[in-house]
Each structure stands twice: as C-alpha cells, then as structure tokens.
Image (cartoon, helix red, strand yellow):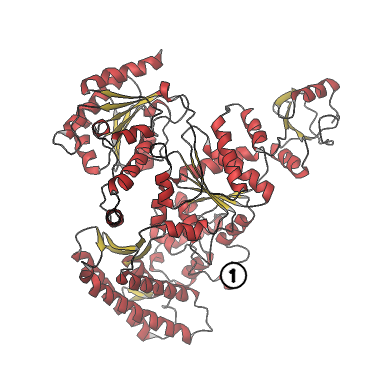
Amino acid sequence: MRISPKSLDLLKKAGPSSLFKVRFNSEIIEIISNANSPSGDLLMVCEDRFEAVKFVATHSLSVGWFFWFNPLDSSLEAIAKPKIDIDGIFESLFSRDGFEERKEQKQIAKIIFDSLKKSKNAIIEAPTGTGKSLAYLVACVIFSKQKGERVVISTNTINLQHQLVERDIPLLQEIVEFRAVLALGRSNYICKRRVEDILTKGNVFLFENDLYKKIKEFLLNTKTGLKSEFFSIYENVPEDVWRNVESSTLLCAHSKCPYYKNSCFFYKARAELEKADVIVANHHLVLSDSILESARILPDAYAVIFDEAHNIERNATNYYTISVSSDDILRSIDALYTKRKSKAYGLLSNVEGYKNLKELLVNFRVELESTFDGLIQQFVAEQLNIDDSNIKLIYKPVSKILELLNSIILNLKGFLDENKDKDFVDIRGVTSFLSGCADNLGTFLKLNDGFVCWIKRFKKTMHFNITPLDVRSALKGHLYDKLASVIFISATLSVGGELEFFKRSVGVDNAVEFIAESNFDYDKLARLLVVEDVKEPTQKGFDEDAADVILSIAESLKNTNKGVLVLFTSYAMLSSIYKRVYTELKQKGFNTFRQGELDNFELLIRFKKGKGFLFATSSFWEGIDVKGEQLSVVVMVRLPFEVPTTPIEKTRYELLKKQGYNAFLEYALPKAVLKFKQGLGRLIRKADDYGVMVVLDSRLINKSYGRIFLNSVSYIKSKRVRKNEIKDFISDFFANFAL
C-alpha cells in the first residue's frame, strides 16, 4: 500500500514512540510490503494487531513501524516498536490513555534489572500505587530477552495472579513479545489413567453413584483438565472426589502410562512451562518445589521474584513443615482395600488371592482408627507442643501406630516383590506414601533439636507436625544457593524505615535494599485518628467504649454511601462488639456484615455494594482491594500483636529469651508493625481514594513503642481525638472532598 507524501510526513514528524490514527478509505486491507523505517513509502498493513506486533518483533526492525487496519472505523493506527529497554517500554506505556508516569515505578524496574544482571538478591518496599507489578514485569522481561534466562514471579494470593495473567502481562505483550505461563500444582490436574481405572475396575467406592458420569463427561469436554474448571461446572460434588482422580507424583506411571506422551494434562502443561520466558506461580508451589530433587514441576530458572513477600517467613514455615495426618493414613489403606456392606473396593479388590493380606489391611485399619480415636479423646487442646515434658503422654499410642504401619508396609512390599513383573503402579505409590508416613512418625518421636514437634487436632483428625524452628537455613539451601538472584518485593517490609527485621527473618545477606516513596498524596487524602480517651483493650469497659466510637462513625456517615471496615485481632472481641452495635447500625440504614456468616469472597461482593459495615479478623488485614467510597474508613480496634499461642510461636519466643534477646522488641513488635501497615493499606487503593483510619487502641500514644508504629507510617498525618470529637472530624474531613 502506498502512503501519500502528506501522510508520510506526518509519520516522520510523529517520532518513533507515537500512537495515532490516520484516516484512509475502507479499501486498504491488503498487506503490500514493509520497510525498516518510515522513511520509505512502502509500509505494512495488518488487520490483526497481534500479528502485526509479532511481525515487528520477529524481524527485529530498528524502528519497526507497523499499521493496524480497523475496518469498523476505516482508520489506520500506527504504532512504533519501542526500544527494548526500560526507558523505551515505559515511554510506550506512559503514552497510553489511563497511564501516568511514575518515577518510582521506573526506578524499581531499574533496580530489579540491575540486580538480575549482577546476580544479586534484593529487598524492595513498594507502597500501593507505585505500580510494582508492571515494574518487575518490565525488568524481568527485558532481562529474559537479553540474556535468554527464565524468571519466576511468585505471588501469595490468587487475586494478584489474576491481575498479572489477565491484565499486566497482556498489556506488556502488546509492546514486546515474550512468553508467559501460569504454573499450577500437580494436584490441580485430573489424571486420565486413574479415571480409567475407576471406571473400568471400580477401585473406589465413592463412585458407586452418578459421580462417575460427571467425571466422564468432564473428560470428554475439557481442554485443560483443571480442578477449578471441574468445580465451576459441578459445584456440589464433594472435594473427596477430586482426591481420587488428581494427578500425583507417587501414583504416576510415567512412560508406562498410555496418556503420558500425548494427552496427559499435567505433562502438557509442564511442557508449556519449558517454553516460557516468564513463569507466574504462587509461594506454595515455588517453596515446595524447591525441596524436590526429582519430580519438580517448575523448570530451572535464573531467578525468582517474590511479590507479597511480607509473609515469606510464615509461608516457608508452613511449606517446610512435615505433616502426617491420621486421615491420610486411613484413606490410603482404604484405597488399597476396604469393605462396604460386604462388597470389596480398592486397588487390591481386583487382585486374585492374597486373602491374608486383605484381611490384615481390614483388621489393621480398625486398630489404627481405634488408636487415633483414643488420642483424639485424650487431647482437649486443639494444638499441643510435644517436648520432653509430655512426650510420655503420646509415646505409647504413636509407637503402636508406627508398629502397625510398619507391619502393613512389610506385607505390601512382600506382595510387590512377588509381583515384580506386574504393573501395580498405584499400589507401589500408596506403599511409598505409607513408608514416608512411617519415617516421619519415627522422626516425630525423636524430638530433634532445631524442630518443633506438635500435634494438631481438627474434628476427628490428628496431625503430627515437624516444623523447622528457623527457616533461614532452609531458604538458603533450597533457594539462595540454587538461584542467581532472589528478589523480595512488597508494600510492607520496613519497620521504622528499616528493612533489618525482614532481612533477619529470611536470612538474606548483602542484598540490594530500596524503600520507595508512595505516589499517593496522603497529606491530602488521609488521616490517622487515635482515640485517646478509650480504655486500653485489656481493661474492663473497652468493648463499650469501642462500640460508642463505631456508632459515632456511623452517625457521621449515615447520609452517605460510604463503607467502613472494622478490623479485630480476635473473633471473641469481634462478636462482643458486633452484638452491641448491630441493631443501631441497621436502624441507621447500614448493611452490616460479620466475617464467618458467608465465605470471604461473597462478603466482599456484598460489602462493595456500598453503605456497609464489615467486621473482620486476620484474613481481611491484607490482600483485599476495595476502591472508592465503598471503603472510606478503616477502624483498627486493637494493635495487631500476635499472642504466642501456637506451638511454633511459643517455641520461637522462648528461644529468643534463652538467647538473651527481648522477644517483644525483636519479634512481636516488628511483626505487629508490619500488620499495622497492612491494615492501613486497605484504605487508599488508588490516587483519587480518600479516607480516615481510626485506631481505638490508646497504647499507640501512651506506650513508648507506639512511636515505632507511627514512624513506620509517617507519610500519613496522625491526630489525637476524643470520643466526642470523632463524629464532627470525620464529617468535616469528607465534606472538604464534596466541595
């Protein structure tokens, strides 16, 4: 297609990073030719924007003008391919509608790129509004393109994964070509071979009814084989069903499976990961995968970027915990052989003979269940730390469980040795799993130094847990020593303007450190009010004082559509105060919600409709994103100190004391400050949000440690107020924005 001289002059003058439209008549649809710069009169026209981007990237055009014809308005859109560097990509981003230049965003991208290039670790605090997700995406994409190395981005929440995969990555792919893939854990995929065994051999008694029809129907129609897709279609199917058909390392037949090469959902997804420049995963997958020598899900990577990194110590503690559950042991034996109403089920039910082995499994299961039930009845507490002082209480029953397990394993191994030539993949897998359980129970009874051994009782299930007391050495061995670079980034990592607590908790030395400034004008947008005449939370009458303040806030907002999030540290206090204010809030016209009445997702949907009071505990202090007036006030009822009640927290607390540290100042206080910042972070989510945070815990101004909290959020103006001043202050604050 030939462009008129006048139009060509316009292209030349526009410069290499412009985005504009030139009108032509509707006949120009064909691709005629292309040129390396707009200095010639032969240019490329393409009806599909993605194909045009792909063409430019593939041919590495120095300026790379491409033209996208839009038949709907007979216009031609010209976009220059940016330079593949940080400045070039951000120049292209900032030229788009809805994007504004943010100095900190580009600065973060350059720090991350430089850290990747020099194989350094980095710790970056990037407050809400700095655009951190696009910053690290730009950095790792450019690095991957230049060096040919793969980077993994790890998130803590599903919401952030969705944002990356559905919004940020597609946006960046319009500017520079790269391949990004979402990685999911193996159990998210259905196993065709296991389904086939169930349908043909009747191995699982759960499928005696119509459930098998749904599984079969799903397999005929699905392209992904994903758990999320299955349960979106069959919402009322019990979770137990998926356990019997999910892909599993222990039960995988690998090359012996007929579906292994061409149609296994898991291995097809795994092959896609190998092609990726950027992989998006979650902390659970990255950390659990890091300890595996074989059967890993993630391919080798140069670096990992941990977003939402403020909880990485807790994540690592959870994922490096070894756990054996009574439920898993009993289910495994049922999977091998069980009887229901005189009918046999399980993997051995179709095996001829071996009557003694089958009877042994049935009898030992009865004994195991009886022993587990005895333990459950013995322990009133839901969690119990096991140490030298109380090991005698559980040693005998756990030893009996171990003895029964070892006997079952010995007999199963004998069976497998006699049938070496037969394809008993699933039986081998279950035997291997039970062997692992036995090994871990043996370790549990030894009470090794450096680990916390503890029991958790949940309903009729006992969990035997072995948790590392210090995760720093595990993180070093499994991550830092294996990767060229590890980047930690979050909105809340610093305490009192320093990153020392986070560095110490995750064991990172010699890391690049950066604390970005917020892009939000907090001086104008927000206020932090500390109510000074409320009793302290431990004093009698605090609940009444707190209820009075909440009702004063409601009075100031009753003629608006604004919403209030009330954050608690315990459900008991939440219930007490909720009962005191519920009736009057309803009378004032507010929609009132309490965590636990509905699932969290549904609560947020209803709360976002406006004029709501949401009373919530720990999980709502972080990760929720409610923009606009639907969340205009955050009430923090109590400073978020964690009482060391769990076995792990108790032991860590005591260890710090024994080592001569002040456990409160060195551990409890920094953790509380970080959670405090997370709570405050719910208030301002975008540049035109505005609101008030009200703290009802007067220790913030009456105790010496209060200044550490306030110094950590020095970007927001704080003010002492009395209970009777709350209503007028909030009314006046919001009235200023209504002008």
Q: Residue 520: where, in percent of width, then height?
A: 47, 27
Residue extending furthest toward the left: 540
Which residue is at 25% across, 65% downward?
387
Does 227 appear above or below 618?
A: below
Residue sitting nearer the eye, 338 or 645: 645
Which residue is at 83% across, 20% downward?
6
Q: Residue 259: where, in percent of width, then height?
A: 59, 66
User: Image quadrant of residue 36?
Assistant: top right
Q: How many marks?
A: 1
Residue 587 visible in the displayed image: no
User: Image quadrant of residue 427?
Assistant: bottom left
Residue sitting nearer the eye, 536 or 350: 536
Which residue is at 35% across, 79% downward?
406
Residue sitting nearer the eye, 255 or 401: 401
Which residue is at 75% across, 26% downward?
15
Does 259 appear above or below 694?
A: below
Please indicate whether residue 571 sits to the left or right of residue 1 in the image.
left
Q: Residue 302: where, in percent of width, then height?
A: 60, 54
Which residue does the numbered mark 1 point to in the structure image? 258
Please indicate whether residue 32 sits to the left or right of residue 143 in the image.
right
Please indicate whether residue 60 sits to the left or right of residue 685 in the image.
right
Q: Residues within 10 Å of mark 1 (few under 14, many from 20)?
A: few
